[in-house]
Amino acid sequence: MQKSIERIAGDSEGHSYEFPVFRFEGTDKAAPSAYLQAALHAGELPGVVAIDALMPMLEKAEAEGRIKGSITVVPQANPIGRAQYHFGEHQGRFHLGTRTNFNRGFPLLAAPDVELLPDTTLGTADQRLKTRLLQLSIGHDIVLDLHCDDEGLAYLYVHASLWPAMADCAAAMGVDAVILWDEDTDGTFEGASITPYLNLPAEVARFDRRVATTVEYRGILDVDGALAGADAEGLYRLLVARGVVQDQALSTPGSFTGLVAPLENIDMMPAPRAGAVLYKVKPGDRVAEGALLATIVHAPGEAGGRTQLFAPQAGIILTRRSRRIIRAGEDLLKLVGDRKSADARSGTLED
Ligand SMILES: [Zn+2]
C-alpha cells in the first residue's frame, strides 16, 4: 500500500490544504478497480470510520496477495470543509467562500477522460478540489462516495442504468434501501462519476461491472465502532463480490431484499410553519396515507398553536432531520412513497 499526500492551493497566499490518498496495487490487470472516498461533506463521518475499519482488512488481503484490482482510498476527501468553523459550529456542507455545496458543481464530462476536465488553476479552492477528486476517481470501475444523512436508514443512490446489475452490491453492503435516479443537472460527485459513461457504447460503458453510488450511512450521529465494523465488512464483501479482492472464505451475497424506489416517489414534506418539531415517525417506519408524521409547535401555549403534518401517501420513512428547530419551508423528512410524489421538487438527487 502506498500513501501519498495531495495538496490543494488555497484561495489566498500562504495557505493550502492537504489530504492523504492510499493505493493498493492489483495483481490482475483484468480485474475491476475501485475508488472509495468519504466525507466529501466534511462533517459526515460514518464513512470515515468505516474506511478506518476497512483498511486493516485490505492490508491483510494485500499481504496475502489477494488484491486483484487496484484500489484507491481517500478517507477524508474534503480538507477545505474540514477546516470550516463558523461561530463554533462546523460547516462541512457548503464552501463558505462561494456558498457552493461541496457535492454540487462537479463537471459532467462527455466521456471518462481526465483531459476533458476544466482548467481550475484560476478557479476557487473548492473547484480545484473537485477537479482533483475526479482526476483520482475517473477510470475506476467501482466508485463509492460515502456520505450520511441527518437521521436515516442506510441507503444508496444508484443511476437507473446500473440497476438491477448493482443489486449484489446493495446486498453485500447490507443497506436498507436503494433510490434510483436518472438525471443529474447539478453535478454531484456520483453524477460526475456515471454521466461520462452514459453515451458510450454498452460494450465500452460495461454497466454490468460498473458501480457508482452515493452511500448514505444512516445519520450524522451514527459514528459508532460497531456500525463502522459492520459497514467495513459490507464494503469488503462488495469488493470481493465484484472480484477486486479475492477471499474464498466469503460466500456470494444473496439477493437484495431491501426497499427499491425511484427518486420521484420521495416526498420531502416542507414545514408549513416555523417552530419546534415533535416527530411521530422515525426512519424505517411504514406509514399509511393520512398518518400523522409530525406536529410543529409554532405558538406554544396558545389555542391553535400546533400544526400537524400528515402522510400524503403510504410509504416508508427514509430520513428525518437531526435538529428539532425548523423554519417554514424547510423539509421535515423523506418519505419514500409507494407511488410518484405530487411534490414538483421530487426527483432531484438530494444528499
Ligand atoms: Zn453528504
Image (cartoon, rainbow, N blue to C red):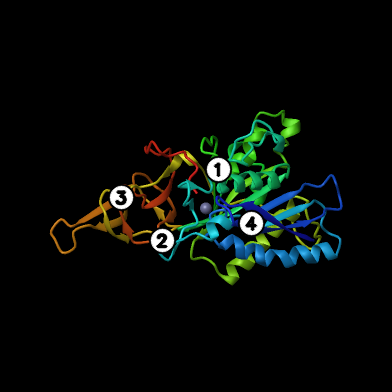
Tell me which numbered mark, 1 or 3, is placed earlier along the sequence.
Answer: 1
Q: Which residue is mark 2?
A: 322
Of badges 2 and 4, the one in the foreground is: 2
The residue positioned 66% from the left and 46% from the top of the image is 132
Residue type beneath disc 3: Ala
Q: Nearer the viewer, residue 53 or 189?
A: 189
Residue 223, percent from left and from top: 54, 67
Nearest to viewer (mark 1 / mark 3): 1
- Please say if 224 is above or below 68: below
Q: Residue furthest bottom?
A: 225
Q: Earlier in the sequence, mark 1 or mark 2?
A: 1
Task: In this rendered view, identify the residue nearer to me: 70 or 265.
Answer: 70
- Give the CA separation, mark 3 to mark 4: 33 Å
Element type at mark 2: loop
Give the residue pinned by disc 4: 173
Q: Are marks 2 and 4 in contact (CB under 8 Å)?
A: no
Disc 3, SS: loop
In the rendered image, is residue 39 in sight?
A: no
Measured in 3D between alpha carbons, the distance from the residue under mark 3 to the one under mark 2, in whole angstroms, is 15 Å
Label 3: how many Cα within 10 Å (few below 14, some 14–19, many 20+): many
Q: Earlier along the polypeptide chain: callout 1 or callout 4? A: 4
- Residue marked by disc 1: 188
Who is closer to the viewer here, 20 or 295? 20
Distance between the Cα atoms at labels 1 and 3? 26 Å
Q: Is mark 2 within 8 Å of ligand 1?
A: no
Residue 116, image quadrant: top right
- Tell which of 302 and 264 is nearer to you: 302
Q: Amino acid at mark 1?
A: Thr
Q: Residues within 10 Å of mark 2 (few under 14, many from 20)?
A: some
Q: Residues within 10 Å of mark 1 (few under 14, many from 20)?
A: many
